[in-house]
Image (tube, rainbow, N blue to C red):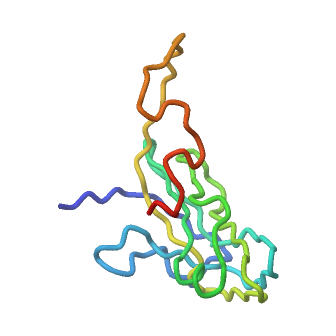
């Protein structure tokens, strides 16, 4: 089944020579995106990493920016607003916000894979204000109300 959706992409001058986002395997959900800059992120620091790309995402879709699992596990590098959302009407440069939760400075080189991009459909909500909500078994039980990790 081919459910590919065309997404227009513009390479900015500082993105010249870099690979476009690409799926690493046939079954991959996310495309690896690379850095267009060199930067060192100190422990606890954040940086919006330039990719040198701008997108025109079709209406009815978003692109989610997600961390790379290897960077998260090995170095504590993640995307703090996971998943980040790129809206269909945004036309500026795609930047990836990275945070270093590790204990050592982390150097990002130009061309390094820094995140994954996932194209996803968007359904917009229409609010239907009511006086009362239906009841459920859970009710108003909030954080931790369904059991802690000890019950797993």
Residue at screen point 34% across, 56% down: 5
Coordinates of residue 12 in the picture (x, y in percent)? 63, 70
Of 151 and 63, the residue lying toward us: 151
Coordinates of residue 124 in the picture (x, y in percent)? 47, 34
Coordinates of residue 146 in the picture (x, y in percent)? 49, 47
Residue at screen point 67% across, 64% down: 80
Of 54 and 101, the residue lying toward us: 101
Number of marks present in the image shown: 0
Of 48 and 56, the residue lying toward us: 48
Compared across the picture, whether 72 is left or right of 7 comes to: right
Q: Residue furthest top?
A: 131
Residue at screen point 42% across, 29% down: 136
Q: Quadrant of residue 96?
A: bottom right
Compared across the picture, whether 87 is left or right of 100 comes to: left
Of 33 and 76, the residue lying toward us: 76
Give above or below for 56 relative to 138. below
Quadrant where the image shows the C terminus = bottom left
Residue at screen point 59% across, 68% down: 53
Give above or below for 150 relative to 38. above
Q: Quadrant of residue 30?
A: bottom left
Q: Quadrant of residue 97?
A: bottom right
Q: Residue furthest left?
A: 1
Give above or below for 47 relative to 138. below
Give above or below for 105 relative to 132. below
Quadrant where the image shows the N terminus = bottom left
């Amino acid at each position: 089944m081919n459910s590919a959706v065309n997404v227009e992409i513009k390479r900015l001058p500082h993105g010249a020579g870099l690979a476009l986002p690409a799926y690493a395997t046939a079954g991959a959900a996310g495309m690896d995106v690379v850095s267009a800059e060199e930067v060192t992120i100190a422990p606890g620091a954040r940086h919006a990493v330039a990719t040198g790309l701008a997108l025109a995402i079709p209406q009815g879709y978003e692109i989610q920016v997600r961390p790379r699992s290897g960077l998260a596990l090995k170095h504590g590098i993640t995307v703090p607003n996971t998943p980040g959302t790129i809206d269909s009407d945004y036309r500026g440069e795609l930047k990836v916000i990275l945070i270093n939760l590790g204990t050592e400075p982390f150097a990002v080189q130009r061309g390094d894979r820094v995140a994954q991009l996932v194209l996803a459909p968007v359904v917009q909500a229409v609010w239907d204000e009511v006086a009362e909500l239906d009841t459920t078994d859970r009710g108003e039980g909030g954080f931790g109300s369904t059991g802690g990790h000890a019950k797993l």
